[in-house]
Image: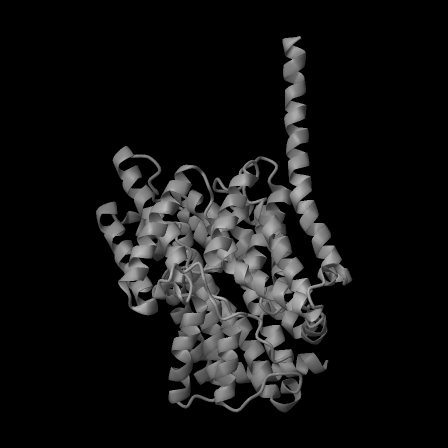
Amino acid sequence: MDILSHLISGFGVAFTPVNLITAALGCLIGTVVGLLPGLGPINGVAILMPLAFAMKLPAETSLILLAAVYIGCEYGGRISSILLNIPGDAGAIMTALDGYPMARKGQGGVALSISAWSSFIGSLVATLGIVMLAPLLAGWAISFGPAEYFALMCFAFACIAGLLGDSPVKAGIAAVLGLALSCVGLDSNSGLYRFTGDDVHLSDGVQFVVVVIGVFSISELLLMLESHHSATGIVTHTGRKMFNWAETKLTWWGTLRSSVVGFVVGVLPGAGATVASAMTYTMEKRLTDKEGTFGKGDIRGVAAPEAANNSAATGSFVPMLTLGVPGSGTTAVMMGALALYNITPGPALFTMQPDLVWGFIASLFLANVMLLLMNIPMVGLFTKLLSVPNWLLVPSILAVSAVGVYAVHATTFDLVLMAVLGVVGYLLRKQDVPMAPLILGFVLGPLMEQNLRRALSITQGDTAILVESPISVGLWICAALMLVVPPLLRWRRLRGEGAPAQLNAG
């Protein structure tokens, strides 16, 4: 009953006119920022944080604004991912695997609407989880040390092998290329530069914006130009904007499963929506893809990662509120916003600032409803992108991509590197090498390396720490199963298909 009374008082805070207007404005800004490739929620929150403080907004209003922007970015990231095959951020990479093929088949509106619905369910499940399970899950998350995180990252990489059912080698090659790119730059432990070729422009490493826009945006533009001349593979427009009841039933259980898994992963500090979306996409593919349609425009391949993506983003608020530990890069920026108001997040926050905490939690419910009501009617507007002719669309995308890359360091080197990565991505995609594992390897590589080094430094180099805890052992077993079971299942399937052929030959 205490939780219910606190939540009711929180809705009293969230329903004030100022906070309602702030939440709606944050949802709109977040959707627009998420739509633009390369910006993502961290940039959106970082840009608005000093603005909110300068406007002397109350602490709870500022937090509601930043949270609405964060969730709105997770919604908006799917738009360019589905329509243009250009993920708005790393969490939207998995959505492109089936969302873009759906758009190419004339189902872009359906993909956008089902992703908005799945995002709503994922965020709703996670918000309910925050209300009921925050203290318990925070205690569980704190039991994860560097060894457990390293095992979790390895499990995520093992899942990558399942992204291409019949081509795990190509997925592995792409992941290795991503890992190699993540190693460029300053070694945080030794302070030495690695793989920079003595070029000062690479001293900070290869930026995420450069990689994602290069291998996705530029390579996609090259493929669009090629398809324009061959008159094949061009994205087509569709009249149907909304998913139907049959599609709802088809995706319902996968959406719920992915929402729960995404929330659990989101609670882990640093794991984030990227890991959650990759794990749930692979999970749903193993559980439901009996026809082999994932990666070819299966609506279940859109709903699952979108639910997990938004659930993990919302779940990342748990360690921030209960432990004072950022659950993601964006929540780390939001903790900086709290510091501006001399508020220290942690276990005492629920008792010292109940109006702030419960008003914030209540605003998450309202922001999700606002985003659903805002995004579903705008599906028709978003799909208008498909009506833009290639002669206008290609240079427009190129201009936006170039501006986004140039804004990182304001150097032409990043533009050249973007072009080089785009050509490499184009050549790899011509050989059916997937780009999603490459980006995942690039994003997760630093986390994997840092946690491995921390674990080994604790034990003076003794690798036994990697298998000491039950959590680590469980994750290693799951990783091994992900690597061993799919090849065995494919071997059994091929053997079963070969047996009738031998009988007929006999």
* Residue at x 51%, y 85% (from the top left corner): 338
* Residue at x 56%, y 82% (from the top left corner): 359
Q: Is residue 61 left or right of residue 500?
A: left
Q: Give the residue furthest to the top.
A: 506
* Viewer can see residue 311: no
Q: Position of residue 309 (x, y in %)?
A: 54, 60
The image quadrant where one finds the N terminus is bottom right
Q: Is residue 450 above or below residue 293?
A: below
Q: Position of residue 229 (x, y in %)?
A: 25, 36
Instruction: Indicate the quadrant where residue 31 lies.
Output: bottom left
Q: Is residue 16 above or below residue 221?
A: below
Q: Is residue 297 left or right of residue 55?
A: right
The image quadrant where one finds the C terminus is top right
Task: Tally the numbered discs.
Answer: 0
The answer to which of 194 and 9 lies nearer the viewer is 194
The answer to which of 129 and 467 lies nearer the viewer is 467
* Residue at x 59%, y 64% (from the top left corner): 271
Instruction: Indicate the quadrant where residue 262 lies.
Output: bottom right
Q: Look at the image and name its color scheme.
A: one colour
Q: Give the residue furthest to the left.
A: 391
Q: Position of residue 204 (x, y in %)?
A: 41, 67
* Viewer can see residue 110: yes
Q: Position of residue 72 (x, y in %)?
A: 45, 67
Q: Is residue 191 above or below residue 113?
A: below
Q: Is residue 283 above or below residue 506?
A: below
